[in-house]
Image (cartoon, rainbow, N blue to C red):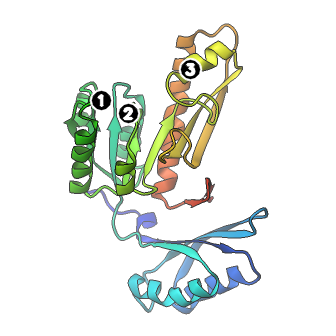
Amino acid sequence: MPEISQRSRSAVLLISCPDRKGLVAVISDFVFRHNGNILHADEHRDAETNLFLMRVEFDPSGMDVSLDELAEEFLPIAERFEMHWRLAKGKRRPRMGILVSQYDHCLADLLYRHKAGELDCDIPVVISNHTAAERLAGFYGAKFVHIPVTRETRREVEQQQIALLREHECDLVVLARYMQILSPAFLVEFPHQVINIHHSFLPAFVGARPYHQAFERGVKLIGATSHYVTEVLDDGPIIEQAVVRISHRDSVEDLVQKGRDLEKVVLSHAVGWHLENRVLLYGKKTVVFD
C-alpha cells in the first residue's frame, strides 16, 4: 500500500451555518483547547443567504482526545450555531471506483495522476460496459470488470456495479466518460459521492453530442464541466469548469480533440479537490476552498 501522506493524516472540519460574529474564533479556540495544530483554514460568506462556510485542516496527532471524542465534544457548539458539519478524519486513504465506457482519455489521466502521487487515494476497481479500457486498467494495476448493459438489463447491471463498489469499499465513484445515465436507486447508495465529467460548459448543451450541438450553434468557446451527479441529468452542483477558444475553421472533430484535453484536466481537478475534502456543497452550489 502506498505511504499515507501528511495530508491524509490530517483531519478536516467542514462547516456551514448562518453567519454571525465570532464563528472563526469559536472554531479555532475549540481546536486549540484540545491541543490541535491548525494547518490551514479558509472561509467564505454567501451574502445572499447570509451563510458562513469554513474549512479547517488540522494535525490531530497531539490532541488530548481521539477524533471520535472530538466530534462528540463539538456537538454542543454545532447545535448552538445551527451548523451543518462533517469531520473527515483522514485515518484511511479514500478508495475510488471508476466507471468508463469506450473513451478512455479521462481514465488514463486519472490512473497516471494516481500513479504519480497526485491523487491521494486507492483505485481498486474499474467497471466498464465495454472492453476497450481493460489493458489500460491492467497496466496500472486496477482490477477491470466488464459488465455489458442494455436497456433491458440496466437495473440488474446497476445492482452488480453497486455490489462491486461496496465489495471494494469505494468512498467515491467517478464517471470517466461513462455514457450511461445512473438511476436514482444508484445515487441513493452514494449520496454526493458520484462525480461526472460532461463535455460542455454547463448549463449549455446538456445531454448527448454536446460538441455537435456547439458546432451547429457556431459558438466561439467550448468547455468541460465536472459536477456531482443528481437525479436531474447534467444539473448537479458544479465543482470545476474550463473553456478553450475555437473558430469557424474548426470541424466537429477539432472540437472533440480540443475538448478531450479540457475534460482530463477538469475531471482530475474536481476529483483531487473532493479527495482533499476541499468541496463543500450548499443548495445547488459548491464552495471549493483553497
| Helix, strand or loop at mark 1 | loop
Q: Which quarter of the picture shows residue 127?
A: top left
Nearer to us: label 3 or label 1: 1
| Residue 131 makes an appearance in the image | yes
x, y (%) of residue 290? 63, 58
The first of marks 2 and 1 along the sequence is: 1
| Disc 2 to disc 1, C-alpha distance | 10 Å
Q: Is residue 116 visible?
A: no
288 displayed left or right of 113? right
Instruction: Check disc 3 and give the amino acid type.
Output: Tyr
Looking at the image, is mark 2 or mark 1 nearer the viewer?
Answer: 1
Residue shown at 37%/28% (left/top)? 104
Residue highlighted by disc 2: 180
Q: Which residue is mark 3?
A: 211
* 139 sits left or right of 85 in the view: left
Residue at image position (49%, 40%) is 267
Which quadrant is home to the N terminus?
bottom left
- The secondary element bearing badge 2 is classed as loop
Where is residue 103? Give x, y as percent. Answer: 38, 25
Location of residue 96 with respect to 102 vertically, above or below: below
In the image, what residue type sits under mark 1? Arg
CA neighbours of label 3 inside 10 A, class few (<14), some (14 to 19), many (20+): many
Q: Residue 151 has which mark?
A: 1
